[in-house]
Amino acid sequence: MDMREGLNAEQRRALEVSRGPVLILAGAGSGKTKTLTHRIANLIANEGIWPQEILAVTFTNKAAREMRERLWSLLEPAKLAQGGTVPRSFMPWMGTFHGVCVRLLRLDGEKIGIRSNFVIYDEDDRLGLIKKSLKDLGLHNKQIKPRAISAAISGAKNQLITPVEYRETATFPFQKDVAAIYEQYETAKTQAGALDFDDLLLETVRLLRDDVTVREKWRTQFKHILIDEYQDTNAAQYAIVKYLVNDERNICVVGDDWQSIYSWRGADYTNILNFERDFPGTTVIKLEQNYRSTGAILDAAHQVITKNVERTDKKLWTDSGKGLPVEIHEVYDEAEEAYALASRIQAQVTIGARKYGDFAVLYRMNALSYILERSLLSMHIPYQIIGGVRFYDRAEIKDMIAYLRLVYQPADIMSFTRIVNVPKRSLGATSVEKFLAWQATTGMDIISSLVNADQTSSLTPRAKTALVRLGEILRTAQIKVQDNVSPSELIEWLLDTLQYRDYVLDGTPASEERIENLDSLISDARTFASVSDFLEEVSLMSSADTAATDEKVTLMTLHAAKGLEFPVVWMVGLEEGIFPHSRVFDAGPSELEEERRLCYVGMTRAREELHMSYASSRLQHGQRDYNMPSRFLSDMGHKAAAIPLGAVNRAPRSDVGEYFSVPDYDIGDRVKSLQFGTGEIVDIDGLAVSIKFENGQLKKLNVEYAHLEKLN
DNA sequence: CGGTTGCACTTTTTT
DNA sequence: AGTGCAACCG
């Protein structure tokens, strides 16, 4: 089977050189995924390599899934055309670094003392555990921000720095605090039978470094290793690669230093620049023909990125035409920006030139999405937000996941503290603290301790009864898991036994949505055979894993847009302080260059049309700011239109027609809130609006955050 | 002791 | 709006 069909000369070379180290420098839109997929297909079809001997690392789970499907269709075109699906037996190792590491740790982690039923802690769990550690250390009165600690710990982990090493090099008081908390946090986490995101990588490094037998096993197994987005690998991921590549050195990495946008989480694009030095004799392949964007878009993106100093030199080219010029829109404020974009989308769809799914709206911060949503909503334009508040971050979903996790890993203290009083069991902080203090002395896990909670001396009879009752429910659930009950059945059973639906149903419109969410959780769970598979998927699910659909406009951050493409792209908020973000101003030139790369990534997502907009004024943190147009626009040679004198204090415009903004409210207006139903405004104090609701409640809400709808 | 209420804060990007 | 935290009530 010839897998070179449909590839250009350079792309072909990427599969003809099937052995030894290969570095593919792939510019934006140069067909790298295609090249990578064809290379793998060629290895399987023509080089006698088995799928399971191939390790392919992608940046998102979605990319892995797509690659697996495309690969299967290359190898078995007929079967897939008949509507067949990829069989379970077809198992190349494909996934993100985190996903692959989980698999390795579940299989071999016990060799370095990791329980195979570890749970994965996300950022919320980590923050919770840091707060607990602060308390345990008696540091909670000091003005220490858990988020700052979390970032410091994560930074240390990504550089493979252990708590002990951190303590030894700590000099400033803050660092000394971090060192102490880091150690305490690690102990607590181990106690809980959990690993955090960074641990997944770190512990894999430790496993491969310390256990020669395990290392040799995988080195032999993986005859070919392929890594996508290599410019965004961090020190731990780099170490994993170094350990896994065997003496045959069949490693192929793909990347583009111009698109490195994750240095803030430890990614180091010099990994790609140093690849040739790490693997002497590397074949370097450059993919510089762009198949995605028009000439005009490519030129503009090139003008921006070439203002960076720290970069390799290359020139993307396309043989498709110039296309439409990049449009830069100056607007008065964020509301006008949202209106301009929404009406433009609506117009193009109405005349049949585009469908909603053709559009993507990209922004620097999730906070910018709110006004865009309002505007799209008001024009009845279907849209979809990727990232933002994830489905799995909703309270009711997190509650149920916490129950599942605790059943699966009965030492998981974060899940326990989340659900101990949900639904209400009259167990307050004091009782829980006393119980946990006692539990720590028993040597039993949390569930066993709960069942035996009546043996404690310090607790009130009421608390004891409640704890034992909870313990019995969890114990029964545990037995169900041992009997291999499916995750969806277990969730159903828990919802019934806990009377969780009743707890959630409080008569508000929002509570019905919560019930719906629980139902979709159950249907999600149906596709998984075991509780552990389901938990793993849920934990590693990223915001970028939601697929874009045909019928909806897609809204997302610039980071989430990496690797995607759309016929029309709108980039909003091109203002100094927004993009580039103000945080980089006092950080240094390299951070600013990363912002510029982010801009480049965003621009090169566009196939046919690229719009960029900036607002003269923007509401931020409840305050109106007046920002200069982004330097990235002047990079492109754009000269800002003069802002009319007096524009600043002008009332909402009439010149843009019926445009949308946070409406002006008056006393007496009727409004609808998703949370509280309908009501009437009785008082206004700046952004704070007092509303008398029909159910008798009087609430003071911030119009900026409360999702109020003005009636009539 | 547990629970409720009121107030301040929220925001950089994410596996 | 959601969250966390301090102050107060039964």
Image (cartoon, coloured by chain):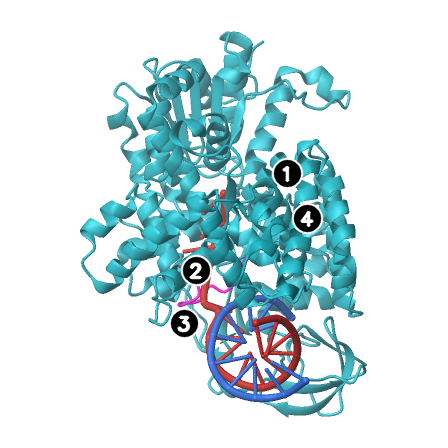
Chain colours: A cyan, B red, C blue
Q: Nearer the viewer, mark 2 or mark 4?
A: 4
> In the image, what residue type sits under mark 2?
Lys
Label 2 vs 3, first from the N-terminus = 2
Of the two numbered discs 2 and 4 on the same chain, state the one appearing first in sequence.
2
Mark 1 vs mark 2: give the one in front.
2
Disc 3 + disc 4, Cβ < 8 Å: no
Kindly identify which chain the residue marked by label 3 belongs to.
A
Disc 2 target residue: A132
Residue A571 part of the magenta-drawn span = yes
Pointers 3 and 4 within a single chain = yes
Residue A238: x and y in percent read 34, 33
Disc ID at residue A560? none
- Few, some or many residues within 10 Å of mark 1 (<14, 14–19, 20+): many
Note whether residue A325 is visible: no
Q: Are marks 2 and 4 on the same chain?
A: yes
Q: Is residue A369 above or below residue A298?
A: below
Subunit that carries the residue with mark 1: A
User: Looking at this view, is A85 or A438 the one in front?
Assistant: A438
Q: Which residues are magenta?
A: A570-578
Task: Between residue A330 and residue A60, name the one nearer to us.
Answer: A60
Say if labels 1 and 3 share a chain. yes
Q: Which disc is residue A472 wearing?
A: 4
Task: Measure the C-alpha gap from mark 1 to mark 3.
Answer: 47 Å
Side (left or right) of A414 relative to A684: left
Q: Is residue A537 left or right of residue A484?
A: left
